[in-house]
Amino acid sequence: MNVLRFSDLIAAGKVAGQRVFIRADLNVPQDDAGRITEDTRIRASLPCIRMALDAGAAVMVTSHLGRPTEGAFNPEDSLAPVAQRLAELLGREVPLVSGWVDGVQVQPGQVVLLENCRVNKGEKKNDEALAKKMAALCDIFVHDAFGTAHRAEGTTYGIAQFAKIACAGPLLAAEIDAITKALAHPKRPLLAIVAGSKVSTKLSILQSLAKNVDGLIVGGGIANTFLLAEGLPIGKSLAEAALLDEAKAVIAAMKARGAAVPIPVDVVVAKEFKADAPATVKKVSEVAADDLILDIGPQTAAQLAAQLKAAGTIVWNGPVGVFEFDAFAKGTETIARAIAESSAFSIAGGGDTLAAISKYGIEKDVGYISTGGGAFLEVLEGKTLPAFEILAKRAAG
């Protein structure tokens, strides 16, 4: 995908003295008192901001925070705690600017944080008049918020249409590179792990990947639906009987290409969905009517681990069992450690996946960890994200 990169503009000496508008993702979790409880997204935005400051730009940064009502500003919607944290991390003052759409005072070498962009009327609907006003604030628009790349909003799409120059920041560029490497030009075999509670929420992803991957590993409730489609017993496990035909179609599409959906040979079951429920390993054909399947079994985990270690590329979205309960976490841990040990290029995304990566401490062993939940899923569905589309269009002139 051909997009203009902010790093290219800096290398060409085109940023000094320019007004740079950065759309970052600073939507961090807060406690009831408004204190930031986890600042990963703020830290992830620093390289782009520092690049702009070091290049001598006048820097404006904005983000959404929470779900404010457009046109009605409430104190809990304020980016004030973010401005304070940014100032600490950058070691410089970061003034917070309200009512900024009609003009912003900022000098080269300075950075200001523009108040919650979703408070502006027309932001979510990508109002053209708002987009043009925002574009007029800057010489260069930098999109560096992959988590919002699947939304066509004022600060993610409209401003990119009308700004003099529109480009991708380092975070967004890294996502584009990782996605291209994993899906557009993968080293084979390409294995995908898609897990979650329901086939219905991931059906279009499964159908899209079935056309491209060499192995499609399903886990969680999704795997139960596939077991049912293969005529295997699942007891009282979570599944979607109404989607058996769709699961069969995915299996058939993979088989037709000489690829496979590996079906578990053993599973870990319990009688209740509880952390302290006794866990029993069973052959998949021996699941009882009152059993709940809560993880893949050790034999299945070992087989999948061997495949993952031999892969060229791995795409990972979702734990394969109820990994929050230690008795049903071994499958996900085995998969995670196999990905960590594999020489394959791996890309992982989704909240539960990131939680598993953190739990097993394999952050440094995953090729790329995606920062966008919904955006990552839409990429796996084969969709072109609005942010990518407009930046590619602008790069093409």
Image (cartoon, rainbow, N blue to C red):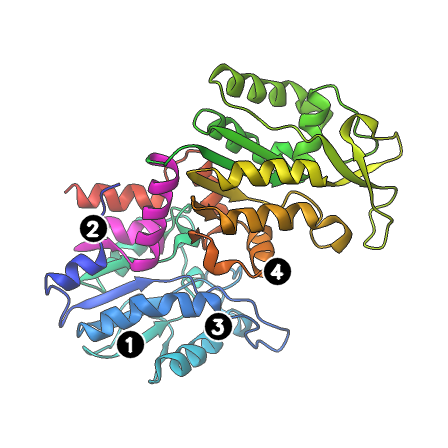
Q: CA distance from mark 2 to mark 3?
A: 31 Å
The reply to whether discs 4 and 1 touch (Cβ–Cβ < 8 Å) is no
The disc at residue 111 is: 1
Pointer 1: residues within 10 angstroms few (<14), some, or many (20+)? many
- Asked whether, in this view, residue 290 is left or right of residue 355, the answer is right
Of badges 2 and 3, the one in the foreground is 2
Q: Residue at x 88, y 42 (%)?
A: 271
**Quadrant in which the C terminus appears:** top left
Which stretch did the figure color magenta? 155-184
Q: Earlier in the sequence, mark 3 or mark 1?
A: 3
Q: CA distance from mark 2 to mark 4?
A: 36 Å
SS at mark 1 in the image: strand
The disc at residue 78 is: 3
Q: Which residue is mark 2?
A: 4
Pointer 4: residues within 10 angstroms few (<14), some, or many (20+)? some
Q: CA distance from mark 1 to mark 2?
A: 23 Å
- Asked whether, in this view, residue 218 is left or right of residue 189, the answer is right
> Can residue 129 be seen in the rendering of this structure?
no
Say which amino acid is labelled 4.
Answer: Lys
* Outermost left residue: 13
Q: Residue at x 63, y 32 (%)?
A: 199
Q: Which residue is mark 4?
A: 359
Q: CA distance from mark 3 to mark 4?
A: 32 Å
